[in-house]
Every structure is written in structure tokens, then in C-alpha cells.
């Protein structure tokens, strides 16, 4: 099945506010307020793109806007993406989770993380490495959840090695599969027709951590799960609502 890539260039409403958590141009987050934001957890969205610098949060605008229209206050995170320097990325994710929620109005004091592809990897990593009492749950969309398997499959033309600068076996601290089980609820939404990050990667993670909820969408591709115009979108929203107790 050919992937619909229109979501990557689709424009959406501009953010209500952009806040910084560091001095660099990529250490920022875009805030979009939802009408029910004060009653719901803050949704922190971490975009994908193979951890590569050419892919930024712009392609997540339509998704962010749709989530805000659904009621949540949404913080779309930008972070540094420097090939071969994963700790820079991890430092940014950690700093953002530690500092930004207190700078955002209109949420109930709880936090949900949602991430796609490489961003899915980052939210699974953060669920363990950035555990905080305010974190209520994680939704990983087509995540690169098993770095060793993704490396073996040569996903993204070697994106895992490009990100880490080494074989993932040398960086167990970077791989959700080699970390302890998350203490919070984790849901993975995975398209069965995904040729970018195939279902085997999510299935490997779920086999290792059987408390993970796996939502399989047999006819959906890699980008359908971030596309508000796709048939997969209602399932993504449903899973966020479940974790929000909404």
C-alpha cells in the first residue's frame, strides 16, 4: 500500500504560544489550548522523522491542532536532533518534561506523552527515564520501540545507527526494550500496513512488556496514525481519551 504523505506538508492553525526550555532554537514547544484543557491532562506531542535534523515539528501541526480541537491543551515539542549525539536529544526530552508543564496553563496537572515513529521511541524511553508523578500515560504511534530489531531491519536506511552513532547493543540505556517496564499505562497504536516501521517492531516490545496495550489497525500505514483525515485517527483519539479518563 502506498503511504499518503500529505500530512507532512499540511498546514494548520498556528500555536497560541511558543515557550522555550533552553537557549537553542530547537529547545521550544508550541502550545495550543483546548476548550476542555483545564479538565484534562496536558498532552505533550513528540514528533518523528528518524531523529534527523531535516524533520521538525512543522509536520505535526495538523495533528496538534486536531488534538486541541478535541479538547486537550497540546504542547508540541521541538528538540535537538544531531546525528550521532543521542544524549543531546535525551537531555532535551528530559528538560522539557521537567520544566514545560509548569509553564503551560489550562490542564489538570497530569501529563500524557504521545509520539510518532522516532517520537514513539522517545516517549517509550521517557516513560522510564523521565518518570514523574504527573505522568499519567503514554501513547506510542508506530514507534521504533525495539532499536536492536530496527537496526537489524535497517529501517530508515540505517536511521538507528545514524541517531546513536553506534550499534544499539552498545547503548542499552537508549533502547526501551533494554530498560525496565514503564510504571505507567502504555498504549501502542500500530498500522498493519506500515512499511516504514513494520508491526514486528511493536510486537517485539509488547512481547517483552505484556502489560502494554497494543491497538492494531490492519489497513493503516505509517502516517495514517498522525493524520486527522485518516480512518485511523478516531482510534488514536479514543486511546487518548481512555488514558485521560475522559
Image: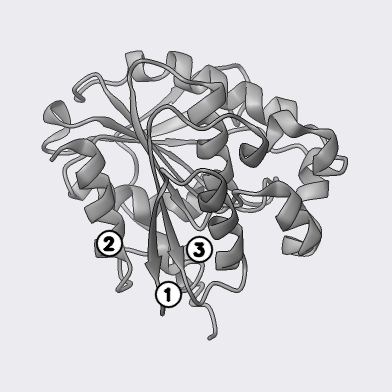
Residue highlighted by disc 2: 235
- Report if the CB atoms under discs 1 and 3 are less than 8 Å apart: no
- Report if the CB atoms under discs 2 and 3 are less than 8 Å apart: no
Is disc 3 surrounded by few (<14), some (14 to 19) or many (20+) residues within 10 Å? some
Q: Which mark is residue 8?
A: 3
Mark 2 or mark 3, which has the lower sequence index? 3
Q: Is residue 88 visible?
A: yes
Distance CA(mark 2)–CA(mark 3): 20 Å
- Quadrant for residue 155, please give it: bottom right
Q: Nearer the viewer, residue 130 or 22?
A: 130
Mark 1 or mark 3, which has the lower sequence index? 3
Per the image, label 3 sits on a secondary structure element best described as helix
Up-down relation of residue 47 to residue 158 (above or below): above
Q: Is residue 56 visible?
A: no
Q: Nearer the viewer, residue 33 or 143?
A: 143
Looking at the image, residue 195 sits to the left or right of residue 140; the answer is right
Which of the two discs, 1 and 3, sits closer to the camera? 1
- Residue 41: horizontal and vertical position, in percent? 24, 30
- Residue 159: horizontal and vertical position, in percent? 76, 54
- Residue for point 57% across, 29% down: 180
Mark 2 or mark 1, which has the lower sequence index? 1
- Quadrant for residue 110, please give it: top left
Up-down relation of residue 49 to residue 244 (above or below): below
Distance CA(mark 2)–CA(mark 1): 11 Å
Which of the two discs, 2 and 3, sits closer to the camera? 2
Residue highlighted by disc 1: 220
Amino acid at each position: 500500500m502506498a503511504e499518503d504523505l500529505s500530512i507532512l506538508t499540511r498546514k494548520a492553525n498556528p500555536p497560541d504560544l511558543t515557550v522555550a526550555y533552553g537557549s537553542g532554537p530547537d529547545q521550544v514547544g508550541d502550545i495550543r489550548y483546548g476548550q476542555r484543557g483545564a479538565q484534562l491532562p496536558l498532552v505533550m506531542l513528540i514528533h518523528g522523522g528518524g531523529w534527523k535534523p531535516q524533520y521538525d515539528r512543522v509536520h505535526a501541526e495538523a495533528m496538534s491542532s486536531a488534538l486541541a480541537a478535541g479538547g486537550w491543551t497540546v504542547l508540541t515539542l521541538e528538540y535537538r536532533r544531531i546525528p550521532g549525539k543521542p544524549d543531546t536529544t535525551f537531555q532535551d526530552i528530559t528538560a522539557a518534561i521537567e520544566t514545560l508543564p509548569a509553564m503551560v496553563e489550562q490542564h489538570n496537572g497530569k501529563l500524557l506523552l504521545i509520539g510518532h515513529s522516532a517520537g514513539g521511541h522517545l516517549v517509550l524511553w521517557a516513560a522510564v527515564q523521565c518518570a514523574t508523578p504527573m505522568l499519567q500515560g503514554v501513547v506510542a504511534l508506530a514507534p521504533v520501540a525495539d532499536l536492536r530489531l530496527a537496526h537489524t531491519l535497517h529501517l530508515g536506511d540505517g536511521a538507528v545507527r545514524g541517531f546513536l552513532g553506534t550499534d544499539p547493543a552498545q547503548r542499552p540505556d537508549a533502547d526501551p526494550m533494554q530498560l525496565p517496564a514503564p510504571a505507567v499505562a502504555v498504549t501502542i497504536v500500530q498500522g498493519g500496513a506500515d512499511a516504514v516501521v513494520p508491526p514486528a517492531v511493536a510486537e517485539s516490545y509488547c512481547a517483552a512488556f505484556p502489560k502494554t496495550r497494543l491497538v492494531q489497525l490492519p489497513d493503516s500505514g505509517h502516517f495514517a496514525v498522525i493524520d486527522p483525515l485518516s480512518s485511523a485517527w478516531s482510534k488514536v483519539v479514543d486511546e487518548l481519551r481512555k488514558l485521560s479518563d475522559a
